[in-house]
Amino acid sequence: MNMDNIEAFLYAFQLGSFNKAAEALYLTQPSITARIQTLERELEGPLFHRDGGKQIVLTERGKQFLPYAQKILHAYQEISSTLREQPHTENSLTIGCTLLMSTHILPEILPIYRKKYPGVGIRILVGSSAYVMDKVLKKEADFGLVRTVSHPLIESYHLHTDTLRLVVPPQHPFRALPSHKLNWEQVGREPHIVLAHGTIEWLMVQRHYHRNQINPHIMMEVDNFEAAKKMVMRGVGISFLPELCMAEELANGLLHEIRPQPAAQLTRKIEIIHLRDANRELVEFFIHAVKSLDRKTLLSKSV
């Protein structure tokens, strides 16, 4: 995902037109259009409504992508600004990671890395676990932060275990029920918002209900956890979400965790991967950096 394309998207959104974005970035309007079209192809859908009017409006996909684009660009600008203040160096580091890792784990690790290696240029590639593994295999990324993947040329190390928690909006009637009075048959009848069919998270939820001999009411499938989280907060349904992405909402009462009995055990391993012949020192540094953050600290900073 090219940073110039993300910047063009944000300028177009903020200024309300492709022409104004082009002027602000000292580009032509066709150049802005081409960058946004490239981004739309990568995200497999339109980001703006194009109705011939002067004012452009975000599509639902564009609204979902907006907070991620803002976080990614902010992190990139922060890193770039810091590194420009350091002496020039030919050393560089490219990290591949999923969106969840880029917003909730990397911001905690990179300051530690920056203190030890202040002159190293950093590039972050964001995509699915399969995308990240492909970048590592092609030597386009030094290492990756992903869910569990497997390949004969890849070595992986456990970095963090994230648990899927079942959450409801704060006004949901389940909030008033104690855990021992809440069972999975009751929960299964509620409208569920799940990650897209075939993902690891989708399979975990399906297997859990299958073990309990329940056919859950799957009302909606989305392609990312942030979308599912917002749907739950607005009372659309309930969802299993990773701890990493909702610590702030739980703390502020915007979401409420429920724990039907028997307790569900839905955990996902987050791993660091690299080629077998890669530099182990770099990988070990990041492993130790994450381990230095205890679980409570990591979750409390996942905002």
Image (tube, helix red, strand yellow):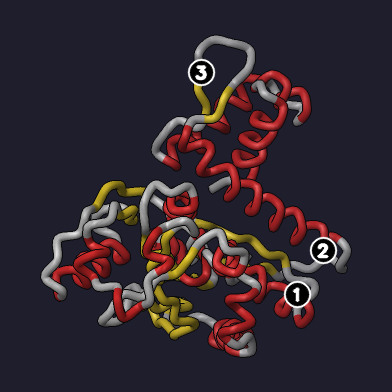
In space, the residues marked 2 and 3 are separated at their CA atoms by 38 Å
From the image, state whether disc 2 or disc 3 is nearer to you. Answer: 3
Q: Are marks 1 and 2 in contact (CB under 8 Å)?
A: yes
Of pointers 3 and 1, the one earlier in the residue sequence: 3
Report the amino acid beneath label 3. Arg
Depth check: 193 or 291 in front? 193
Q: Specify the label residue 137 is tagged with.
A: none
The residue indicated by pointer 2 is 82
Residue 113 rendering spot, x and y as whole percentages: 71, 78
Query: Residue 104: in sight, yes or no?
Result: yes
Q: As drawn, is 240 to the left or to the right of 297? A: left
- Kindly check if marks 3 and 1 are in contact, taking CB atoms under 8 A apart as contact: no
User: Disc 3 on helix, strand or loop?
Assistant: loop
Give the secondary structure at mark 2.
Answer: helix
* Sequence-first tag of 1 and 2: 2
On the rendered structure, is 130 left or right of 135? Answer: left
* Local crowd size for mark 1, using a 10 Å CA cut-off: few (<14), some (14–19), many (≥20): some
31 or 70: which is nearer to us?
A: 70
Q: Residue at x 28, y 56 (%)?
A: 190
Residue that mark 1 sits on = 114
Query: Which residue carries the number 3 mark?
Result: 50
Q: In which quarter of the image is the C terminus?
A: bottom right
- Percent from the top left, x then y, of residue 150? 31, 75
Q: What residue type is labelled 2?
A: Thr
Decide which of 188, 31 is in the foreground and name it: 188
Residue 211, position in %: x, y? 15, 75
